[in-house]
Amino acid sequence: MNEIQPYTSKNMSFKRFRPLRKDAQTRDLLVEVQLSPEDFILPYFVVEGKGIRNEIGSLKDVYHLSVDSILKEIEEPIKLGINKFLLFGVVEDFRKDETGSFSTSPENPVNKAIQEIKKVYPAITIITDVCLCAYTSHGHCGVLVGEQVENDKTLPILAEMALSNAKAGANIIAPSAMMDGQVWAIRQLLDKNGFTGVKILSYSAKYSSGLYGPFRGAANSKPAFGDRKTYQMDYRVASQAIEEMEADLDEGADYLMVKPAHTYLDIISKAHTKYPEVTLAAYHVSGEYMMLKSAALAGIVEEKHAVLEVFTAIRRAGANWIISYYAPFVAKLLKS
Ligand SMILES: [Zn+2]
């Protein structure tokens, strides 16, 4: 038998990594990224009515909730340590019009939900998604002229929507329409009305993605014609993500976002490297959620293991906050 000699190139023996992984205790000592329930933002889809808790066909284990149902639903995640919630309004067709005017009404389900949640849980952070697509009859994110989404005509309505959320008690406004200047328009109107303390989390790098399908079912916001490629970003381009972020920070954004997350880890990493001091959120979107969920249900992956791995990867890439339908599932795993 020949004895294997140590590798001696440059007078060194080869490097041994396996001792770093030799047992659970050693591996735990070397952990660099650890998830916590406070990293997560849990989205809710708010509907009008009473006693409603209907599972959304396209999103397993996610529900349409009326305001009273949210107050029950939110108890458990809060107990698990989740302290940030993102609200989306979902309204019946008769509420919708060309300009999405119900989005600015104090009577819409999001504004009612904020008020009720804040009465019971004043210390919880409420974030609102500010976009018109759930409120327009055509399902586009802005006001139309012909078949074109008109950027500058959309800005005042987005700002009014944000103001109505701030008046209801929202802590953070998250504009997602991808209209140029939306952060600036919102910041100005909030400040003018005394809401200087309300923060802005901008969907800065929001890509036109094939992974939003299940969400459109959930929010009843599918465009009646065309697509969103004239305002959402082209996934073949990385450089515009940083330019969009630069512009949003200039306009007054406090926090930035990359959407989707799992398939855009390179963008998250670039953003974190460029702005290490800015809180960065990543949205693990409906299609990413359902890919994991479906694979788990089909027995293709072990859900607990795969989910922890995916979310750790998103944090490792540089995201501080992760918006995810999996938030309660992860928080439960972390507790056990
Ligand atoms: Zn939209």
Image (spheres, grey):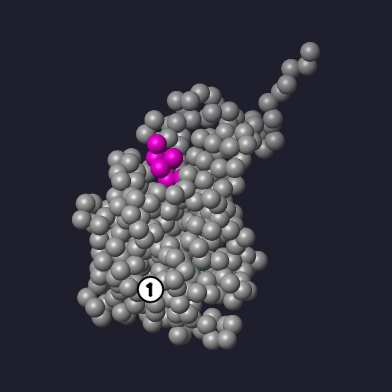
| Residue 212, picture quadrant | bottom right
Looking at the rendered structure, the secondary structure element under dot 1 is helix
The residue nearer to you, when weighing 251 against 178, is 178
Q: Residue at x 58, y 37 (%)?
A: 297
From this viewpoint, which residue is outermost toward the right?
1
Q: Residue at x 45, y 37 (%)?
A: 31
Confirm if mark 1 falls within 8 A of ligand 1.
no
Q: Residue at x 40, y 36 (%)?
A: 332
97 is higher (above) or lower (below) than 3? below
Per the picture, the main secondary structure of the magenta-coloured stretch is: helix
Q: Residue at x 62, y 60 (%)?
A: 210
Magenta stretch: includes residue 327: yes
Circle 1 is placed at which residue position? 102
Label 1 Cα neighbours within 10 Å, binned few <14 / some 14-19 / many ≥20: some
The residue nearer to you, when weighing 310 against 91, is 91
Identify the magenta region: 325-332
Magenta stretch: includes residue 35: no
